[in-house]
Image (cartoon, helix red, strand yellow):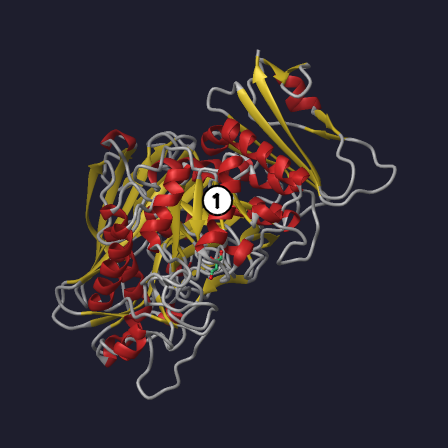
Amino acid sequence: MSIAVSADQKTFYLSGGNTSYVLHIDDDGRLVNLHWGSRVADGSLSYCPSDYYGGASFDKEISRIPLDIPCCGTGWYGTPAVGVRNAHGDDVTDLRVVSFRLESGKPPLPGLPAVYTESPAEADTLIVELCDDWTGLRVDALYSVYHHSGVIARSLNIRNTGIQALSLTSVLSASVLLWESGPDLIHLKGAWARERAVIRTAAGEAEHRISSARGASGHEENPFIAVCARNTDEFSGRVWAMNLVYSGSFQAMCRTDNGGRPRLSIGLNPEVFSWKLGPGESFHSPEAVLVYSDHGLNGMSQEFHALYRTRLVRGTWRDRSRPVLINNWEGTYFSFTEERLLAIAEKAKQIGIELFVLDDGWFGVRNSDNCSLGDWTVNRNKLPSGLNGLSDKLHAMGLEFGLWFEPEMVSPDSILYRTHPDWCLHVPGRHRTEARNQLILDLSRPDVQDYIISAVSAVLSSARIDYVKWDMNRNMTEAFSEALPADRRSETQHRYILGLYRVLETVTSSFPDILFESCSGGGGRFDPGMLYYMPQTWTSDDTDAVERLKIQYGTSFVYPVSAMGAHVSAVPNHQTGRITPMRTRGEVALAGNFGFELDLSELSAEDLSEAADLVRRVKEIRDLTRTGTFWRLLSPFDGTYTAWSSVSDDQKSVLLFAYRSLSSPNSSPLRIRLAGLNPALSYRNEEDGTICHGTALMNAGLTVRLNGDFSSRVYRFSAV
Ligand code: DGJ
């Protein structure tokens, strides 16, 4: 068991890998956190519980206690993990522990995505039951610890056992006080086409809050927050990170208390959430995944990657090589015919591409983004032999067939909208705000969920479809459901996400062989919630090689290479206007789920031959990039060089990717120090046959010459 309970049944040591998370029930029955950090021996913190009572001050003692489920109204002044307005109109909540139990393995969460176990031996779960006697509010706090890694997964099951309705006003899946002074804060900031830039700043005394109120996790912030010691770098030092397994609005905070200690928390965004909890009802929070590493930021990311690749992603594609694809979006946009698609496919087949993906514009009368979302019937003017005919022709050529959908949306100019104008999110009588000429279907409604399931399933059953790109191209406005009573309208955003999860669960389990890729204007919903249903995500609409270095580098803070769609597009790049060599565009995309996003028939003979070479190379290395340990070596945020690597589990195969965005005259060559090799082994550089010792590659480094703007090289090493 990864959970040890002290003899007095009051302290719980959740330990795995190098990490311990230690909880204690204090003399007043409060649940407090004694330690989250490097591993401690079971039973070794028995001297600790009195430590935090030292601060005699104007503040009540409770304001300094490291409560693990803090609540408001009795002297604790931060954001409550469980905020409740009761029938009397006050929000005083005082949770005390009433019982606990242990389970081996990890229970699934009802209707919510969550990390899982394949055998009960992989993790253990502590369930602590707390109660506020006054209202009858009960909370089951679930803490699962993975034996191998020490990753903690937390969630709350909040129950109303009283006789009057309660209103949940705040739900944080995790809120932990850390014993670290003056740390740095890290989050992933962005915008459309600039997703997940790494922001690192001193946490200082300020209160930091990142959030989304958009109804999606969003381009602007990712549901991820971390703090690290000031001297932590990619390779060493302490870091504590939280990631919410959720695809909707969220908040994450780092607040330093007046005792100088930071509290890190993550959960639902109370600006757009409250929930009526009637007598006998329960509410399950999304899950927070907590990773601690004392091996720097790479150590943190590698824990997330391993867990998400093997115990978040599910289904037949979890452990399979992903096909090399070509997507027609940037090649043709809406302007295509079957003939043009087949011409692109012909060239694609010639250079070894395996999957042809038909993007937006195949349905209704859609020739621009101003109509037809919701009318999922094939446009016979563009595709006279239908999806079935196109799919058969592609399969006859030896290609698989993939299809784009945007099922959560409706165009006002559509048969669906004219038939069901009440099916979108809106406030009766108010203007309905459009974005990209579309409205959002009200997925909080079971009838709308059922419609989407049947409309998508009908198309997927109508032709041989091997891949689906599930897109979502706007954020919520007037985010209220007409189908909910007034006192439940503020539940709409969360109910939408629960409805979306029901739709995704039903569709993906009905078509288990289809490879699903999620998308939201690129990476506007790149989160673990979506990865639970769909093993990969379109990382960004920005396909410029230089910009992609930053986007993929930032994304790798949490998400594995196997989750990132990465395509080669035409130049000048459609987002930045930049012209980069085909080889560099390819070598950036090689570090992801590789594909093309252009019209191959427009390439020069030289570029087409380079493209063919890239396809040959990706097939050789894709299993290693998908399953290997990913190391960030040089950051594009720190200078003109970027480098990262993949190292196989047995440490015998290594890929080093090196990039230079801008050259400068008279500069020295670069030495890149590799990481994660076996120091007892020697490696052959497959480029030139030279043999280098593992210690030399890691400690002295490989001399890399990159000449010219936008240059790149990929090195392969094999143990000899
Ligand atoms: C946004 C996606 O990110 C693009 O790749 C493309 O599918 C368009 N939507 C189509 O409308």
Q: Nearer the viewer, residue 679 or 629?
A: 629
Q: Circle 1 sits in a helix, a strand or a loop, which is it?
A: helix
At 50% from the left and 34% from the top, the residue drawn is: 352
Q: Which residue is mark 1?
A: 345
Q: Is residue 374 left or right of residue 643?
A: left
At 25% from the left and 55% from the top, the residue drawn is: 457
Number of numbered discs overlaid on the protein picture: 1
Question: At which x and y percent is residue 453?
Answer: 24, 58
- Three-letter code, disc 1: Ala
Q: Quadrant of residue 398?
A: top left
Quadrant in which the N terminus is drawn:
top left
Quadrant in which the C terminus is drawn:
top right
Judge: label 1 CB < 8 Å from ligand 1: no
Q: Is residue 165 left or right of residue 596?
A: left
Label 1 Cα neighbours within 10 Å, binned few <14 / some 14-19 / many ≥20: many
Q: Nearer the viewer, residue 483 or 538?
A: 538
Q: Is residue 93 left or right of residue 399?
A: left
At 25% from the left and 51% from the top, the residue drawn is: 461
Check the image and report above or below for 261 versus 107.
below
At 57% from the left and 58% from the top, the residue drawn is: 193
Q: Nearer the viewer, residue 573 or 698?
A: 573
Residue reaching furthest to the top: 720
Question: At which x and y percent is residue 324?
Answer: 47, 38
Regarding residue 443, the answer to whether it shows in the image is: yes
Q: Quadrant of residue 16?
A: top left
Regarding residue 515, the answer to whether it shows in the image is: no
Question: At which x and y percent is residue 654?
Answer: 56, 24
Q: Nearer the viewer, residue 522 or 651?
A: 522
Question: At which x and y percent is residue 360?
Answer: 44, 60
Residue reaching furthest to the right: 666
